[in-house]
Image (cartoon, grey):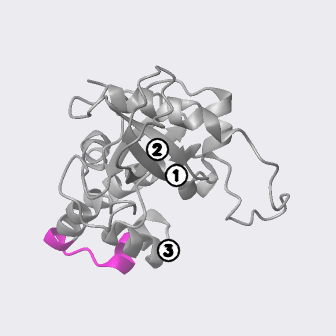
């Protein structure tokens, strides 16, 4: 079942981009508070569409998200891509139908990784305690290293491309490539395009490996 490609409301976008822990250059600090209560229903709606999700469990609490990737005007092409992780807790629903998950019982640490371009959802991953769609590596309640890291490392090593060459070919810093290889930096559409060129692969293939929605409009791709 496809979750990506959905349109995000302005309230959800405001809640996802409320980062009081991050000092924005030239912006107000701390930023004016926003309504984070829109996120649990949004997340519960996404989780309910995952075939492996127990629908009796609900997101009961969230904290302000932290940005993993923020769009930039790299090489003159606006990359309107943002990815954040939103920590919180999940627990058994309370049965009153309001979706707030404030019933009695066990609660577990939860983190959602959400990538979006403009108002379009590009990537969604949920991690509950140590459970993700694949095997968990990071501690409970922490974002999982992006699986693209292992594939990128293998492809670079197979082709004999050192980090410095990949940085040169993509116009990125070595630290960015190192973070990509470790899973601490997630690929966004423009970076995927540049990596594909450096690897001699099609952009579509690398997008699929990176878990990006290849059917979404590509506003950042030169025409």
Marked residue nearer the N-terminal end (2 or 3): 2
Helix, strand or loop at mark 3 = loop
- Residue drawn at 59 percent across, 56 percent down: 75
In front: label 1 or label 3: 1
Q: Is residue 218 magenta?
A: no
Instruction: Report the magenta residues as a range.
Output: 157-166
Question: Residue 158 in the image: x percent, y percent?
Answer: 14, 69
State whether residue 128 appears in this view: yes
- Residue drawn at 51 percent across, 23 percent down: 98
Q: Residue furthest front?
A: 104
Residue wearing tag 1? 84
Q: Are marks 1 and 2 in contact (CB under 8 Å)?
A: yes
Report the quarter where the N terminus lies.
top left
Helix, strand or loop at mark 1 = strand
Question: Residue 126 in the image: x percent, y percent?
Answer: 35, 45
Crowding at label 2, few (<14), some or many (≥20) Cα neighbours within 10 Å?
A: many
Name the quadrant containing residue 205: top left
**Which numbered circle lies on residue 173?**
3
Residue wearing tag 2? 114
| Marks 2 and 3, how far apart at CA | 24 Å
Q: Residue furthest left?
A: 158
| Marks 1 and 3, how far apart at CA | 21 Å
Marked residue nearer the N-terminal end (1 or 2): 1
**Which numbered circle lies on residue 7?**
none
Name the quadrant containing residue 198: bottom left
| Marks 1 and 2, how far apart at CA | 5 Å
Question: Considering depth in this image, is 37 or 151 the residue closer to the camera?
Answer: 37
Crowding at label 3, few (<14), some or many (≥20) Cα neighbours within 10 Å?
A: few
Name the quadrant containing residue 105: top left
Question: Considering depth in this image, is 83 or 78 the residue closer to the camera?
Answer: 83
């Amino acid at each position: 079942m496809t979750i990506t490609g959905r349109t995000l409301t302005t309230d959800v976008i405001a809640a996802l981009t409320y980062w009081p822990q991050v000092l924005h250059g030239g912006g107000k600090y701390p930023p004016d508070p926003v309504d984070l209560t829109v996120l649990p229903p949004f997340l519960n709606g996404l989780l309910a569409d995952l075939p492996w999700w127990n629908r009796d469990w609900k997101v009961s609490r969230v904290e302000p998200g932290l940005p993993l990737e923020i769009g930039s005007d790299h090489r003159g092409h606006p990359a309107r891509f943002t990815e954040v992780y939103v920590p919180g807790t999940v627990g058994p629903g309370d049965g009153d139908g309001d979706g707030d998950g404030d019933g009695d019982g066990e609660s577990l640490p939860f983190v959602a990784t959400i990538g979006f371009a403009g108002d379009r959802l590009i990537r969604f991953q949920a991690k509950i305690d140590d459970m993700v769609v694949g095997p968990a590596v990071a501690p409970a309640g922490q974002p999982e290293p992006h699986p693209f890291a292992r594939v990128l490392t293998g492809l670079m090593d197979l082709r004999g491309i050192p980090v410095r060459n990949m940085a040169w070919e993509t116009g990125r810093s070595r630290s960015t490539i190192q973070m990509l290889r470790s899973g601490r930096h997630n690929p966004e559409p423009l970076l995927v395009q540049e990596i594909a060129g450096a690897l001699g692969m099609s952009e579509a293939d690398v997008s699929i490996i990176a878990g990006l929605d290849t059917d979404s409009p590509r506003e950042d791709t030169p025409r």
